Every structure is written in structure tokens, then in C-alpha cells.
């Protein structure tokens, strides 16, 4: 009887914890994101309305969701070039979620945009991580002894000595799914991803236009599948073709992109039902990159037509 009562009490405890989960609004009840995090308890959601928030936030080990109301174009966390914009360094797990922000103007020794240390494994989704820098490693994201999950993110325009986009070392194993990593730079190695003694996985993603390397590996391993890698990379389903971004900092795919309908549906987590825009993640076969093309893709053919006095002229013909 005591054992049964104990189970009942335990069940009531779980129920109470779930019922007591709260939404904390910024601005509203709290003027800053960090003040809302400070007040939050496990299971709570911090909902952030439109605006640019100049602050550097730390999840403090809490299993909470920090989420924008209207997405990356409307909700920006600006690190004021004073430190990492977002820090996870207290053993956060997958239920520590950052979603729907532009993370910009962070500057730190390691992890200008996002810094993950000390066995932290947060979930980072639907974010734009851009314009951050690190004096040493991980301009966009830095992970040490961490296994974060990164999905539906664009990581661009970040810089560091090592790992302009992402730097991982010390047995880190980040899972990178349906991300676009482009236009990042490193002074020494790994413009896109620098991996040292770690084992990240990359699937359904695009690495294009990073310098000096898309990927730099020293010790450990990196498993890349169903991804578009400039210069090519061994792995099932990988391609090496210009992804045909819209351009001008817009990483949506044009209708004739080779990244459309060539990803792996089985590699998409069950909870990842939408893309970075909130559109259906799988329309037919999942696309590579952060954005799922929603229209009808086309094939584009380049035909050289000789003309009088000219070697040839280029004509582009698109067909289904």
C-alpha cells in the first residue's frame, strides 16, 4: 500500500510541475530577456516580442524555452560586442531551447554568437546567427564537451581564428540538421566548421562560400550526409553544386536549385515539422538547407547558340 501511495504522490508531483509551467513575457512582465530567465523555472517558456535586445544572456542550467513571438527578422539579440550573445555553461540539456532569434554582434575569446561548455546539450532552432566574431575560436558557435542540436539555422558572416561558423572540440558531438552555413571566415582553419577531437554529424545542410575551408578536421571524425558541400565531401547523398541562393544575404533557394528534393526524409527529427519560415519542412522530399522550397522546382539548361560573327551566345531555358 505504501508503494502504491508513493507512486500516486509521485504522479501528482509530475502533474503539478506540468500544470505550473508558465509563460513569461518580454517586454511585459520583464524588461529584459535575462531577467525573465532569472525568474523562470524548469518547463517555463520565455516569449520575446519584437525588438532589438542589447544584452548577453545565460540559460543558467534551466530547462526552459526562450522563443521569439514573430521570428528572426523581428526579434534580435545584440551582444554589443562585449561577450558571447548566448551562453550555455551549466550542463543544460535538450529541453533548454533557443528558438527564433537573430543572434548578432557578439564578440568573445570563444563563441561570439553562442558559447556551449561544460557538458551542455541545448536545442538551437530557427535562428539566424550572423555578424559575430571570436578572437580565437567559434565566431558563430563554440562547443566544448557539448552535444547541442542545431536545426533550421542560417549561420553566416561570422569570423574567428578557427571555425568562423562553428568550432567544436574536446569530445563534442553537435547534430546539425537542415542548416545553411555560408559566408563565414577563419584566419587559420575551418571557415564553415572546424572540428578538433570531436564527432559532429551534418545532414540535409549546405556549406558554401566559407573561407578558407568549408570543413577542417583534426582528430575525431565528422559524418556528413545528404548535404551540399563546396569542393565536395565524402558521404551518402552529398553533392557539390552551387546551391543557387536567392542572393544578397537571402539564403532561400531558387526554383532551379540542385538542393531541392534531394535530402533525407528519415534524417529529419519527428518534431522538426516546419522550416525556418514556419512552412512545412517536408513538401515532397526534404530540401537541403534551412528553407524548404514551397513552389514547383524547375530544371535549367544552358544552351550555346552560335550566331554570325560571335562564337556563341548563352540562352537559359527552364523546363519542368
Image: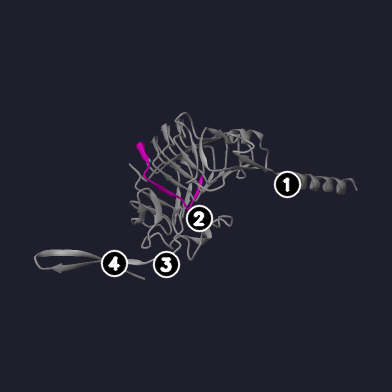
Mark 2 / mark 1, whichever is N-terminal:
1
Mark 1 / mark 3, whichever is N-terminal:
1
For disc 2, the marked residue is 275
Furthest residue toward right: 1
Circle 2 crowding by C-alpha within 10 Å: few under 14, some 14–19, many from 20: many
Q: Is residue 57 highlighted in magenta?
A: no
Measure how far apart labels 1 and 3 are at the Cα level. 43 Å
Mark 1 / mark 4, whichever is N-terminal:
1
Say what secondary structure mark 3 lies in: loop
User: Residue 21 location, x and y as percent?
Assistant: 70, 44
Magenta residue span: 174-189
For disc 4, the marked residue is 301
Measure how far apart labels 3 and 4 are at the Cα level. 16 Å
The numbered dot on residue 296 is 3
User: Residue 82 location, x and y as percent?
Assistant: 47, 28
Say what secondary structure mark 4 lies in: strand
Amino acid at each position: 500500500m505504501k508503494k502504491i501511495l508513493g507512486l500516486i504522490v509521485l504522479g501528482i508531483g509530475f502533474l503539478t510541475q506540468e500544470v505550473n509551467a508558465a509563460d513569461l513575457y518580454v517586454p511585459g512582465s520583464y524588461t529584459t530577456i535575462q531577467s525573465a530567465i532569472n525568474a523562470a523555472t524548469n518547463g517555463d517558456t520565455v516569449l520575446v516580442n519584437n525588438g532589438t535586445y542589447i544584452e548577453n544572456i545565460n540559460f543558467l542550467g534551466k530547462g526552459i524555452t526562450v522563443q521569439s513571438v514573430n521570428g528572426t527578422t523581428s526579434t534580435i539579440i545584440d551582444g554589443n560586442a562585449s561577450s558571447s550573445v548566448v551562453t550555455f555553461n551549466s550542463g543544460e540539456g535538450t529541453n533548454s531551447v533557443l528558438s527564433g532569434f537573430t543572434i548578432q554582434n557578439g564578440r568573445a575569446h570563444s563563441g561570439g554568437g553562442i558559447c556551449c561548455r561544460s557538458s551542455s546539450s541545448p536545442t538551437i532552432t530557427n535562428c539566424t546567427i550572423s555578424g559575430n566574431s571570436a578572437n580565437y575560436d567559434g565566431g558563430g558557435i563554440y562547443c566544448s564537451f557539448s552535444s547541442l542540436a542545431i536545426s533550421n539555422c542560417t549561420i553566416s558572416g561570422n569570423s574567428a581564428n578557427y571555425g568562423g561558423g562553428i568550432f567544436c572540440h574536446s569530445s563534442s558531438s553537435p547534430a546539425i540538421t537542415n542548416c545553411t552555413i555560408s559566408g563565414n571566415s577563419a584566419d587559420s582553419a575551418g571557415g564553415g566548421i572546424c572540428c578538433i577531437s570531436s564527432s559532429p554529424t551534418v545532414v540535409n545542410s549546405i556549406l558554401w562560400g566559407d573561407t578558407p575551408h568549408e570543413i577542417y578536421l583534426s582528430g575525431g571524425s565528422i559524418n556528413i550526409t545528404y548535404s551540399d558541400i563546396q569542393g565536395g565531401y565524402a558521404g551518402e547523398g552529398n553533392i557539390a553544386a552551387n546551391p543557387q541562393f536567392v542572393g544578397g544575404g537571402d539564403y532561400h533557394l531558387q526554383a532551379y536549385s540542385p538542393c531541392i528534393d534531394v535530402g533525407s526524409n528519415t534524417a529529419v527529427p519527428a518534431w522538426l515539422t516546419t522550416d525556418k519560415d514556419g512552412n512545412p519542412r517536408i513538401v515532397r522530399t526534404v530540401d537541403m538547407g534551412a528553407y524548404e522550397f514551397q513552389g514547383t522546382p524547375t530544371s535549367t539548361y544552358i544552351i550555346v547558340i552560335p550566331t554570325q560573327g560571335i562564337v556563341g551566345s548563352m540562352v537559359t531555358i527552364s523546363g519542368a
